[in-house]
Image (tube, rainbow, N blue to C red):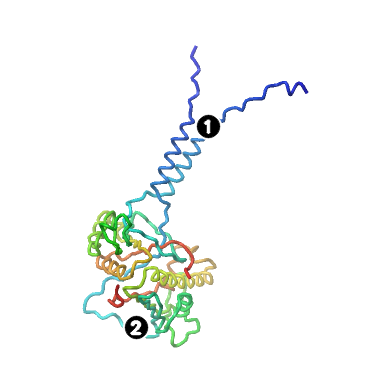
């Protein structure tokens, strides 16, 4: 037995960390591919309603967003506590929507213009009066393809 | 004699890439835009009356400011809405009080009895967006189920698995017949 006990305990060899960075980079690229950049910070709080029949929004480059909701707590001094509309990165009025649609339309190539979709991202507490006003403005502006944002979920009881 | 280059210490590399990873996780969001797609009707030209529609071809859905439903002038529950809508649009027994059908030649599907029924959806200004979306969701569910049934009997596949022409045929056979009333100023808030 002396052959075994006599030897000093072997030191653990250092782990080779060389491929660690490869793995992390792979993760990084994975996340870069499946995610999109946050376009603008929201000033309004939006909890979308849930629906079971929701579909994915196609052609994200042709989508312009209209956000509707109560301003966030730190914005309430400036914008009040009633639901407001946010277009791009500023709080706007219903009457601004036509101009907004025009701007968005002009920013897109001519061939894609019929496919432009306007996504209405509204909080579930928002009253339909506001949404109806928005819809009427969109009709006037000729942006007829719309999309009601909702999250996937079962029917609420 | 050339000296052997010592191995580069790459352990900090993973730290850097972790940092990058964390950064991208922060500033990005997973593509989560889901929802219900609809088409708005073009604005009505002035001095033109909307076309008359027979009463049997209309199913009215009213949502009031307290989020309560009125289906064809009776109180209704959201749970029943899908089945009521399916029954109305499908009219399986050809009842005289449910919508008429028109035989239409649809390419890829043959002759199909397309329902003339229209679901008329009207809401108050005080209706919550949540309720409105639930109603839209149920109506979409009704149409989707009918499309699924049709494509399973005709093509043996679910609607979502059909090819483009078949999609179009089924869409023509069962259109999204939801009409939204011009908004009124009732039930304001």
Q: How many marks?
A: 2
Q: Residues within 10 Å of mark 1 (few under 14, many from 20)?
A: some
Residue at far bottom of view: B96
**In the visual, does B92 lie left or right of A57?**
right
Quadrant of the rendered structure where residue A145 is? bottom left
**Viewer-closest of A147 and B102:** A147
Q: Nearer the viewer, mark 2 or mark 1?
A: 1
A73 relative to B15, above or below: below
Residue B102's disc is none
Seen at 75% across and 21% down, the residue is: A3
Residue B105: % across, % down? 43, 75
The residue that label 2 is drawn on is B53
Seen at 22% across and 60% down, the residue is: A99
The residue that label 1 is drawn on is A17
Query: Disc 2 sits on a residue from what chain?
Result: B
Residue at far top of view: B1
**Tag 2 and tag 1, C-beta contact below 8 Å:** no
Q: CA distance from mark 2 to mark 1?
A: 74 Å
**Viewer-closest of B1 and B73:** B73
What is the secondary structure assignment of the residue under circle 2? loop
Quadrant of the rendered structure where residue A116 is? bottom left
Residue A94: % across, % down? 25, 64
Would residue A50 be seen by someone viewing this image from the given angle? yes
Quadrant position of the N terminus of chain A in the picture: top right
Query: Disc 1 sits on a residue from what chain?
Result: A
A67 relative to A36, above or below: below
**Viewer-closest of A30 and A72:** A72
**Viewer-closest of B12 and B3:** B12
Residue A147: % across, % down? 36, 63
Seen at 41% across and 44% down, the residue is: B24
What is the secondary structure assignment of the residue under circle 1? loop
Quadrant of the rendered structure where residue B189 is? bottom left
């Amino acid at each position: 037995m002396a052959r075994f006990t006599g030897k000093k305990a072997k030191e653990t060899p250092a782990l080779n960390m060389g491929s660690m960075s490869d793995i992390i980079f792979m993760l990084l690229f994975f996340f870069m591919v499946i995610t999109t950049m946050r376009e603008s910070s929201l000033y309004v709080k939006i909890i979308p309603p849930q629906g079971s029949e929701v579909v994915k929004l196609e052609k994200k480059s042709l989508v312009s967003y209209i956000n509707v909701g109560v301003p966030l707590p730190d914005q309430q001094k400036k914008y009040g506590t009633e639901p407001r509309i946010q277009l791009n990165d500023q709080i706007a009025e219903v009457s601004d929507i036509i101009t907004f649609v025009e701007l968005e339309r002009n920013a897109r190539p001519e061939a894609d213009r019929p496919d432009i979709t306007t996504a209405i991202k509204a909080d579930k507490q928002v009253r339909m009066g506001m949404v109806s006003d928005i819809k009427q403005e969109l009709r006037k502006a000729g942006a007829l393809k719309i999309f009601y944002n909702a999250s996937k979920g079962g029917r609420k009881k | 004699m050339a000296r052997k280059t010592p191995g580069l210490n790459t352990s900090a590399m993973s730290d850097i890439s972790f940092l990058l990873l964390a950064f991208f996780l922060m500033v990005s969001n997973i593509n989560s835009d889901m929802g219900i797609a609809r088409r708005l009707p073009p604005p009505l030209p002035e001095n033109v009356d909307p076309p008359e529609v027979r009463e049997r071809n209309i199913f009215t859905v009213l949502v009031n400011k307290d989020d309560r439903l009125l289906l064809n002038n009776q109180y209704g529950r959201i749970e029943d809405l899908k089945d009521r809508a399916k029954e109305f649009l499908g009219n399986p027994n050809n009842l005289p009080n449910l919508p008429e059908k028109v035989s239409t030649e649809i390419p890829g599907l043959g002759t199909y009895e397309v329902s003339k029924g229209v679901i008329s959806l009207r809401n108050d200004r005080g209706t919550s967006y949540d309720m409105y979306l639930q109603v839209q969701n149920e109506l979409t569910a009704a149409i989707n189920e009918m499309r699924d049934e049709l494509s399973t009997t005709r093509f043996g596949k679910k609607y979502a698995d059909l090819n483009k022409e078949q999609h179009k045929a089924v869409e023509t056979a069962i259109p999204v017949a939801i009409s939204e009333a011009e908004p009124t100023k009732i039930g304001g808030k």
